[in-house]
Amino acid sequence: MYASQRLNTFILFSCIFLFVGTEVLLSPFYPQFFEKVFGIEDLSFTGMYVFLCRLTVVLISPIWGLLSKRYDAKRLLLIGQTGTAIACVLMATSQTEQQFLVFSICLLFFKSSYLLLYTILLQHAGKGRKRVTGLYHAVFQSSVIVATLASSWVIQLDDPLIVFWWAAALDAVQAIVCFFIFKRLRAYVAVPQDLDTTNNRVGSFGFLMKMALIIFTLHFSVTLIRPFFTLFSERELHTSVFTSSLLFLVPSLMAVVAAPLIMKCRSEKLPYFYKIAGITLVISLLVQGFVVTIPAFILFRCLFGLSLAICQASLEIVLFQRGGNVHYQYGIVSAFQNMGLLLAPLSATYLVESHSLQHPFIFAGVAAAFHLVLVLLTIYSKAGVQEEKRIAKEVNHRNVG
């Protein structure tokens, strides 16, 4: 039985790998994609497209979490996977940029349900939630690496839209595979109710909002440099398309490297490592905009990726160690995360059009500094750390009981 559970967990993580890969496949080259496929040279369209897509995720993500309170999360996920496959087919047949935008919104409406796949794994992990979190980020970033490498090839295809036919097929396969896994493995069907119900002190709404704001500021800061990163690399560092994609994925590679360290790190050491990682994150963001040599740029990209991985995983560990309805909690936090991903491209577009390609790095560093101060004043203040230790003891005692 244990071997069967491990196999099914492996398959579900494989689904996460495919989900992330198909989502980020073209993201490093959206400006080039819209110019090649639809003849759109205005960079503001890229900013508007990313803005509307992220707005959709912000609005829809909490809805899937709320629905999981009334309906089985597994069934909701299967509905989302099926809808995602259909939306991908529609995107592959787009004739204009307006059609592509509308079908993209439809895609993200259904694809937002995939957050349930991560929380299903967390829900059944018990005391192994830190391990699941570490594995999730390793799988997530590994998929980003593969997808980014593939994107430099896809963007050079005569018809890049063909990639959405492939994505539709993969989503359909995932839906079929998950259907049989959920049907066969009872552990993923029966959800203990006592794990979804906690007292108000442990699962306080105030704490959830605090975490949501912290995660918002983190993702806003690091996403500022993403929309025009490949253009920055090509124009300022004079790299090729393939080299710029390699530089784009360096932080993802470092996140994979960091995953085993995160899983082995004791919870009481996380505040210390977070402070170091936060400072490194601020410095690496600022310096990337001014480095003129490739070796130095790679060094600070590595530091950026390592520190970001530690920050992201640490926050999720703090969030999920309290127990409660992980579907609802992650839905709310994901909405704020995507709000950061929503506002960052608009801000980056304004900074690039009004100033230069270096300015997103400058403002990203400032935003990351604000995030770090916010964390040090709340969850990782002296009082905050003591509170988290007390909460962790209460949750462990309840789980044992």
Image (spheres, rainbow, N blue to C red):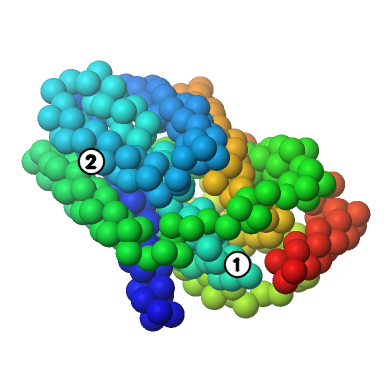
Q: Secondary structure at mark 2?
A: helix
Tell me if residue 349 comes above or below residue 386 in the rendering: above
Q: Nearer the viewer, residue 60 or 3?
A: 3
Q: Residue 31 lies in what quarter of the image?
A: top left
Residue in the image at 54% along x and 46% along y: 327
Residue 17: x, y in percent?
35, 59
The answer to whether the residue labelled 1 contacts the one labelled 2, judged by CB atoms less than 8 Å apart, is no
Tell me if residue 45 comes above or below residue 263 in the rendering: above
Residue 155: x, y in percent?
20, 44
Tell me if residue 16 comes above or below residue 110 in the rendering: below
Point out which mark residue 71 bears.
none
Tell me if residue 34 comes above or below residue 98 in the rendering: below
Residue 207: x, y in percent?
76, 43
Which residue is tagged 2? 85
Q: Is residue 278 visible?
A: no
Residue 383: x, y in percent?
91, 54
How packed is label 2: few (under 14 Cα within 10 Å), some, or many (20 or more)? many
* Figure quadrant of the C terminus: bottom right
Q: Residue 280 lies in what quarter of the image?
A: bottom right
* Figure quadrant of the N terminus: bottom left
Q: Is residue 196 left or right of residue 371?
A: left
Q: Nearer the viewer, residue 253 or 182?
A: 182
Q: Is residue 289 left or right of residue 34?
A: right
Q: Residue 359 lies in what quarter of the image?
A: top right
Please name the amino acid that badge 1 sits on.
Gly
> Which of the two discs, 1 and 2, sits closer to the camera?
1
Which residue is tagged 1? 126
Residue in the image at 32% along x and 64% along y: 184
Residue in the image at 42% along x and 39% along y: 112
Q: CA distance from mark 1 to mark 2?
A: 32 Å
